[in-house]
Image (cartoon, helix red, strand yellow):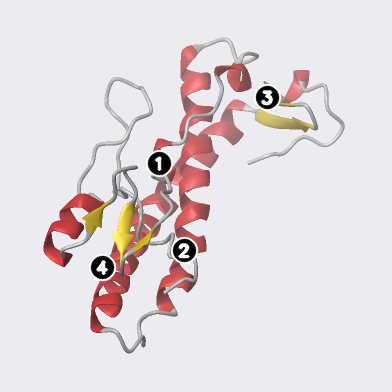
Amino acid sequence: MVQDRRVFSNDMSISDYTKSGEVSGKKTKTLSDVAKKLKLEQSPDGSIVIDNKSVERITNPLERQFPDSRYRHLGAYKYKLGAAEYDVTRWALSEAKRYIPLLRGYLYDPNPRKRMEAEKWLKTFNAMVVELEPQLQEYTRRLVQAGLVLCQEPDDEAWYFRHSAPCDQPFEP
């Protein structure tokens, strides 16, 4: 297991964006579901316990919230929503890809329970990558078509239309 064992402590799920246009996630499988089968315990502070050690909680990357000020220069709701969908999808995809190599390291662990947990989480993260890669491509296409760029200043990050971006080297999706 990862030395700090954070990998198995999250309520992870594969999520979709709602039809209403808001970015949100709907749970499909939580750590609690897995914990019931694996007889994991929950400590009084809410963290999951594996092998009698408290595990730090991490959040579902699809539930990350970016500040509204990041989209303040875009005007129309459809541009704000498009940039928010891109941001969340890009973040979640990078987080999923970050955990996959860590999980693969536990596929040969001598502890069968750890191997089983790693296999389940690896399946979840791989499915997330498969689902999010085409979504990110579509959101990227939309942002490029709309002419949106991200200015990443040390004290502020905000989306702009390419023609009005105040930064010298804006990030283009």
C-beta proximity under 8 Å, tags 4 and 1: no
Q: Is residue 102 left or right of residue 9?
A: right
Q: Which residue is mark 3?
A: 158
Q: Residues within 10 Å of mark 1 (few under 14, many from 20)?
A: many
Dividing the picture into quadrants, the one containing residue 66 is top right
Q: Is residue 47 left or right of residue 160?
A: left
Comes first in the chain, label 1 or label 2 = 1
Q: Amino acid at mark 4?
A: Lys
Q: Nearer the viewer, mark 3 or mark 1?
A: 1
The CA distance from mark 4 to mark 3 is: 37 Å
Q: Residues within 10 Å of mark 3 (few under 14, many from 20)?
A: many
Q: Amino acid at mark 3?
A: Ala
Q: Which residue is mark 2?
A: 99
Secondary structure, mark 2, is helix
Residue beneath the point at 40% across and 50% down? 132
The CA distance from mark 4 to mark 2 is: 13 Å
Q: Which residue is mark 1?
A: 62
Q: Which residue is mark 4?
A: 120
Q: Amino acid at mark 2?
A: Tyr
C-beta proximity under 8 Å, tags 4 and 3: no
Residue beneath the point at 35% across and 55% down? 9
Comes first in the chain, label 3 or label 1 = 1
Q: Amino acid at mark 1?
A: Leu
